[in-house]
Amino acid sequence: MSNLVIRLVSFGALTLFGCAAASAHITLETQEAAVGSTYKAVLRVPHGCEGAATNVVRIKIPEGFISVKPMPKAGWKIETVKGKYAQSYEYYGEQVSEGVQEVAWSGGELPDEFYDEFVLRGFLTAGLPVGETLSFPVVQECGDKAERWIEIPKASADADSLEFPAPGIKLLPKK
């Protein structure tokens, strides 16, 4: 093979790999939401872990996202971890100081070659910083393997520069 052919094949493989890696992140379907409103978080899981099927999806609920309720998913068990918030929040005229801090779907099987979504909803409190990104760290388990989508970019950094970025939403002003 000539050097030119080898370089072209190598470039093509790198291009394909780069495209696959860039689109392989767990993301949120809607990536913007207004503070002081209800937000439906639809986590998009595009693959398993190194070819293995996904059987657990675990999401850490960020501070300021309250009154969280996960959507049941056929064939999967839902577990929530509840605890105290860092502060009290007003929610429909009442003060709430504790709630869901983690949601896990487990017991199902999402083969590597398929895509699926995991849904929860909650309330984005009015005190969240408009213009910033609210991150939702996710751990995806596949038997004895795991992918930890937990990297949160610094204020001036781009999430695309991270290897395992946490999905996030840009916080917009209340409408």
Image (cartoon, rainbow, N blue to C red):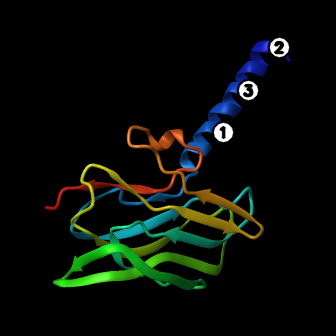
Asked whether the viewer can see residue 59, the reply is: yes
- Label 1: which secondary element: helix
70 in relation to 3, above or below: below
Is residue 100 positioned above or below 124 on the image? below
Q: Position of residue 35 (x, y in %)?
A: 23, 63
Nearest-to-viewer mark from 2 and 1: 1
Q: What residue type is labelled 3?
A: Ser
Residue 17 numbered tag: 1
What is the crowding at mark 2: few (fewer than 14 residues within 10 Å), some, or many (at least 20)? Answer: few
Q: In which quarter of the image is residue 55?
A: bottom right
Judge from the rendering whether residue 129 lies leftward or rightward of residue 149; answer left or right: left
- What residue is at 31 percent from the left and 50 percent from the top? 132
Name the amino acid, label 1. Phe
Write down the residue under mark 2: 2
Which residue is drawn at the image coordinates 64% and 37% (left, top)? 16
> How many numbered marks are there?
3
Which residue reaches farthest right? 1
Q: Which mark is residue 64?
A: none
Tell which circle, 1 or 3, labels the residue nearer the N-terminal end. 3
Q: Which residue is drawn at 26% across and 69% down?
A: 125
The alpha-carbon separation of the residues under discs 1 and 3 comes to: 10 Å
44 or 174: nearer the eye?
174
Q: What numbered label is drawn on residue 10?
A: 3
Q: Where is residue 144 in the image (x, y as percent from the top left)?
A: 78, 67
Which mark's residue is nearer the viewer, 2 or 3? 3
Q: Distance between the residues labelled 2 and 3?
A: 12 Å
Does label 2 or label 3 sit earlier along the sequence? 2
Residue 70 shows in the view: no
Q: Where is residue 154 in the image (x, y as percent from the top left)?
A: 44, 43
Location of residue 141 in the rendering, given as x and y in whole percent from the top left corner: 67, 68
Q: Distance between the Cα atoms at labels 2 and 1?
A: 23 Å
Q: Earlier in the sequence, mark 2 or mark 1?
A: 2
